[in-house]
Image (cartoon, rainbow, N blue to C red):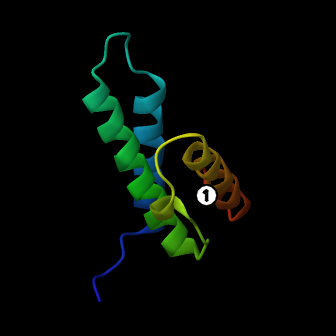
Amino acid sequence: MPERRPIERIAADLRRVRRTLANFEPGTSAVKKIAARQAYDALLVQACDALEVEHRLHLLPEGMDRSIERLRLEERLRERGLSV
């Protein structure tokens, strides 16, 4: 089994990618936005796995339900002490 990354590193990466998502300039390509969102989701999954939080990100297509699941997971991770 591969060694897990430290949760502190995952949290730092989550915050960095979240800032990137929040600060895209007008005109940023859709490809960059989608890639950043996918990177954020992958980091959320890593954090959930590390803190044993169940998630459904891999089951939901892009859209409102997936956005709601992101918010739910961010809140669950905060409840477990992870600063997102």
Q: In the rendered view, would you say 52 is above or below 26? A: below
Closer-to-camera residue (65/11): 65
- Position of residue 80 in the picture relative to residue 70 (left or right): right
Residue in view at x 51 percent, y 56 percent = 60
Closer-to-camera residue (37/22): 37
Q: In the rendered view, would you say 79 is above or below 68? A: below
Residue in view at x 69 percent, y 65 percent = 80
- Image quadrant in which you'd find residue 46: bottom left
Total numbered badges shown on the rendered structure = 1
- Image quadrant in which you'd find residue 6: bottom left
Dot 1 falls on a residue whose secondary structure is: loop
> Residue 11, percent across and down?
48, 55
> Residue 26, percent across and down?
38, 10
- Give the quarter of the figure containing the N terminus: bottom left
Query: Disc 1 designates what residue?
Result: 82
Q: Residue furthest right?
A: 79
Amino acid at pointer 1: Leu
Closer-to-camera residue (42/64): 64
Q: Residue furthest bottom?
A: 1
> Residue 79, percent across and down?
73, 60
Residue in view at x 62 percent, y 56 percent = 73
Residue in view at x 30 percent, y 40 percent = 35
Q: Residues within 10 Å of mark 1 (few under 14, many from 20)?
A: some
Q: In the rendered view, would you say 2 is above or below 33? A: below
> Residue 63, percent across and down?
52, 40
